Image (cartoon, rainbow, N blue to C red):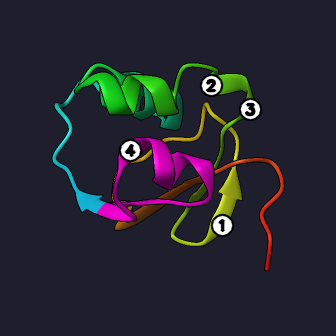
Amino acid sequence: MKVLYFAWLRERVGRAEETVEPPAEVVTVADLARWLAAKDEAHAHAFENPAVVRAALDRRHVKPDAPIAGVREIAFFPPMTGG
């Protein structure tokens, strides 16, 4: 699965995108954010306040409890992004 980071999330993680293979117990957007946060200090900093991080699955905005099964791309971004 490709993970895209935008705005300050990209700055904190230190990259615009990465490909990940989360374990089977990671089934929702929130699970994925927690799993990513546990990867290293940069990801932990990016996801330190999950309430302000938004997500889109295959370019469709979703809530944190959305399932990620079969998703090719997930984007994480702050509530407002510039054009």
Magenta residues, start to end: 3-17
Q: CA distance from mark 3 to mark 1?
A: 17 Å
* Res 49 → quadrant: top right
Q: CA distance from mark 4 to mark 1?
A: 22 Å
Placement of 68 over or under 72, stated as above or below: above
Residue matched to label 2 = 50
Residue matched to label 4 = 13
Disc 2, SS = helix
Residue matched to label 1 = 60
- The 10 Å Cα crowd at callout 2, few under 14, some 14 to 19, many 20 or more, is some
Disc 4, SS = helix
Residue matched to label 3 = 52
Placement of 18 over or under 32, stated as above or below: below
The earlier-in-sequence mark between 2 and 4 is: 4
Q: Is residue 41 left or right of residue 47?
A: left
What residue sits 66% from the left and 38% below the top? 53
Q: Is residue 8 left or right of residue 51?
A: left
Placement of 74 over or under 38, stated as above or below: below
* Res 33 → quadrant: top left
Q: Amino acid at mark 2?
A: Pro
Task: Kindly check if marks 2 and 3 are in contact, taking CB atoms under 8 A apart as contact.
Answer: yes
The earlier-in-sequence mark between 3 and 4 is: 4
Which x, y percent locates residue 80? 83, 56
Disc 3, SS = helix
Q: Is residue 19 left or right of residue 16?
A: left
For the C terminus, the quadrant is: bottom right
* Res 39 → quadrant: top left
Q: Say which of marks 3 and 1 sits in front.
A: 3
